[in-house]
Image: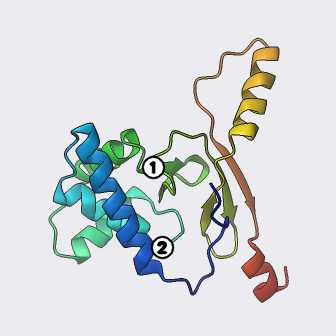
Amino acid sequence: MSKPAFLPHDHNHQRCIDAALAEARAICQRKHSRLTPQREQVLRLIWQEHRPIGAYELLDKLREEGLKAAPPTVYRALEFLQENGLIHRIESLNAYTGCSHPSEPHASQFLVCQQCQRVAELGSEQIAEQLSEQARRAGFASAHQTVEIRGTCAECLRHFHV
């Protein structure tokens, strides 16, 4: 994973959205999973910003676009997207963000900027292996890792002089 952790605020964001949707379609086709229009719409909304978005905010955005969505529909779409590796849940925020490398099995660590609310995915296998090893040494069998680091991104540090 060689992309910079945080993309500049002024990058071509539509390119991110288009690439994420194209990759999601290809992954679902390979897995014989059905990426319905509503699931794709939820994924597009998640990718609209590089900040986590909650289920009820997604529901509001779907309704603003004229779709008659209910909470169970949104939660089912989120579950599908997460099961297919297309999104991640930022547990501390109870919100979701797009997976930057859905075609590659990987462990994820997240940098969460407290200023601009953007999230960057690190995906360091080395960190994941070290945590698993520490857990094993403690006699613990880990089933899932979610590492979230909260702080301030470089752009916000420059802008806000934090």
Residue 57, can we see it? no
Instruction: Measuring from the top left, give residue 150's x and y in whole percent.
Output: 73, 59
On-image quarter of the N terminus:
bottom right
Q: Name the residue under label 1.
A: 102
Instruction: Measuring from the top left, give residue 14's x and y in whole percent.
Output: 40, 79
Question: What residue lies at 68% left-to-right and 50% top-to-bottom?
Answer: 148
Instruction: Measuring from the top left, give residue 32's x and y in whole percent.
Output: 21, 39
From what the image shows, is residue 127 above or below residue 61? Answer: above
Label for residue 49? 2
From what the image shows, is residue 64 above or below residue 133? Answer: below
From what the image shows, is residue 25 above or below residue 116? Answer: above
Give the mark nearer the N terminus: 2 vs 1: 2
* Horizontal side, residue 15 vs residue 89: left or right: left
Between 17 and 71, which is closer to the camera in this rendering?
Answer: 17
Instruction: Measuring from the top left, give residue 72's x and y in whole percent.
Output: 25, 47
Q: Quadrant of residue 130?
A: top right
Residue type, label 2: Glu
Between 82 and 75, which is closer to the camera in this rendering?
Answer: 82
